[in-house]
Amino acid sequence: MPPTRLTTPPADPLQRPVQFLKGIGPERAKDLQKQGLFTVRDLIERVPRTYRDYSRFKRIAEAQPGQMETLRGRVIGATEQRLRGRMTLVKVLISDGSGVAAGVWFNQPWMAKRFPVGREVIFAGEVERRGAQVQITNPEWELVDEEGAQDPIHAGRIVPIYPLTGSLNPRDVRRAVKQALDLGAELMPQVIPPAVLARQGLMPAKDAWRAIHFPADDADRTRARETLAFEELLVLQTGIALVRQQNTVEAVGIAHGPDGPITRAFIESLPFKLTEAQERVIREVKADMESTRPMNRLVQGDVGSGKTMVAAAALAKAVDSGHQGVLMAPTEILAEQHYLNLRRIFAPLGVEVVLVTGSLSKKERESTLGMLQMGLARIAVGTHALIEENVLFHDLSLVITDEQHRFGVRQRARLQQKGATPDVLVMTATPIPRTLALTLYGDLDVSVIDQLPPGRKPVGTYWRPEAARWAVYDHLIHRELAAGRQGYVICPLVEESDKLQAQAATEWLETLQRRYPGVRFGLLHGRMKPDEKDAAMEAFRRGEIQVLVATTVVEVGVDVPNASMIIIEGADRFGLSQLHQLRGRVGRGQHQSYCVLITDAKTPEARQRMQVMQKYADGFALSEKDLELRGPGEFFGTRQHGMPDLKVANPIRDLAILERARKEAEALVKADPMLHRPEHAALREAVKSRLGDQFGFILVS
Ligand code: ADP
Ligand code: MG
């Protein structure tokens, strides 16, 4: 933070503290600083939230009540009235020959003095009619003196509106920004290299910064926004291109051999034929693994698309080549399920698979870790217990994380460090539009499993009010169970604690059991002991439990193809992607399946979510909707996903710009790998200062 008491401003005008601006004393400087605005440059980079178009003048006689209008005239007088109590009202009358209009202010008696009779002024705002007169309450205003006539900033033009609160009034801020621009716009770095600028038809930075605040017209504003969004995305994409280049050029990874007996036996042992999409993705993964370049691949596939098979194929290849592979899952239940699946596949081939979770006994843990360290166990499956320090591998060549969206970048990195530049595969069902995935996981290659195994029918999704609850359960019991199917009941999300949630699930099970005494219900929640969870899952898998009453512990990965119906209680408590994951527990076999969302959904947002769920079965369409509804900030959560803050660009709305920026960035880094050319100096500086810590790399000088 710059010191608040400086006697002489620093030489670089962009670094000059805001309190040196006219009209910004120590008080207002503090208010600006609270908004993160310390310097002239900060002010320039504070992009308006929105604009009001006060550029089109209307004759006063033609002003329409209810419309936002801009009027211009000479002051013919001002009145000040006392109202009830201490209220005052100032009216300033202007005339343009066609009529008379009033600007009205409450409790600002000093306003009268601002408008000497005879001065020409501009008033802008929503017009009201009072008898024969039109008036605007709290108008934006501008005195048309010599200077203002040339360059008005409050009215008589497109006027910027800033996201500022507190004691700052919009006029102060506009005036401060205007001064900042006059001081510093010319000095703003030209980040987009001139050649790119010309090719893309964008504005020079100094013009773009001026125009984003005080555009001449709509076209000017649009072009300025496009330019600055492009600049922001170019910086991001250049950072990504640099990382990719570094991965390609510098790091040497493990080159796995061609398919061996384990891989072949694995494929032959499958009870089904792989889908074309699975085969394609497996080919891409294998090619990466055979190359010396370390694999960094994201596999995206909707819930139920069969990502586990891709993981298994990669693990088989690691084993064939004499190395070890690891698969990390976000929950114990999912880790155990993967473990059972993989053991079923690999044990008959003589490949030892071990499970590492937090709930191993001390003895189990010792022997498991020993086997891994000595290389006797070739495949490890587990939770984040895998990243603990004392988990050591003999020769780890492949790291897979499942449901990547649940892990932070750092956790993935720590697992990676257990091998020497191992190949990395991350799998996710959070279906992000492909182009967007490139910004998010830009240092990764992306494979998409865009096909479900054959015979899957879309899950019928229905939103029902609480009043219809028992009709829904009757359907589950009398239709689905009667036909030999199974079902899930998900209890509402209780924010406060695991414990309350477990309790809610237990009570709900009792209620259901009383109502349907003949049905075999089972319970699954996060407070159960691991072997209790195991037993419940196993009983459900074997069909001994017909209806599993569960909390969201079943959210990811749980796979019982005979389950054909899921009832989600309190569905309004869940976000869209969570609902989609839960819905993905059914429709995993040949049977027509149903997902019923029970809620009275009181808020408009909740109703919208339920409608979106009913309408979209496809996770891709759904996630695009989700992005639209929530905006990228909330959708991606925090920095955890590696999404940098974007001030101007919106990666959804600006996909086309993003794509252009990506192409330019790739060409640029190819031509000038360290960005040493003088015309790339500003871009280099921007990449370093904006992305340095997020990408964990430095452009060595
Ligand atoms: P997800 O992508 O959600 O992790 P899974 O890997 O759990 O999906 O697979 C979902 C279900 O589909 C599992 O029961 C799996 O055995 C089955 N499956 C996977 N691939 C195929 C296929 N090619 N044909 C038929 N069933 C498949
Ligand atoms: Mg899965």
Image (spheres, rainbow, N blue to C red):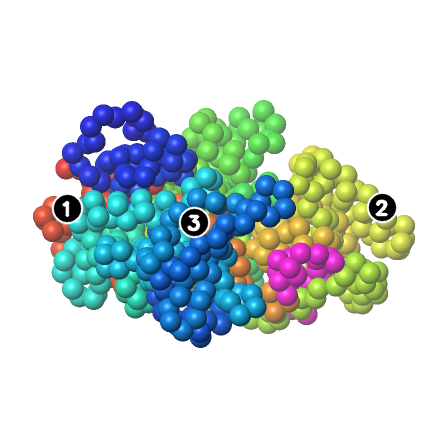
Reading the image, the residue beneath label 2 is 510
Q: Where is residue 471 in the image (x, y as percent from the top left)?
A: 83, 64
Q: Which residue is drawn at 48% across and 53% down?
A: 79
Give the spatial CA distance, label 1 vs label 2: 68 Å
Position of the C terminus, as image quadrant, is top left
Q: Where is residue 158 in the image (x, y as percent from the top left)?
A: 35, 62
User: Mark 3 belongs to which amino acid?
Assistant: Ala
Is residue 593 a member of the stretch shown in magenta? Answer: yes
Q: Which of marks 1 and 3 is in front?
A: 3
- Above-or-below relation of 275 to 307: below
Tell me, yes or no, if residue 262 can be seen here. Answer: no
Q: Position of residue 396 (x, y in %)?
A: 38, 39
User: Mark 2 belongs to which amino acid?
Assistant: Glu
Q: Nearer the viewer, mark 3 or mark 2?
A: 3
Q: Where is residue 469 in the image (x, y as percent from the top left)?
A: 81, 60
Reading the image, the residue beneath label 3 is 112
Span shown in magenta: 590-611
User: Is 418 on the left-hand or right-hand side of 549?
Assistant: left
Mark sitting on residue 681 = 1
Q: Do the residues labelled 3 and 2 touch (CB within 8 Å)?
A: no
Mark sitting on residue 100 = none
- Above-or-below relation of 19 to 178: above
- Crowding near the residue tagged with mark 3, few <14, some 14–19, many ≥20 C-alpha atoms within 10 Å: some
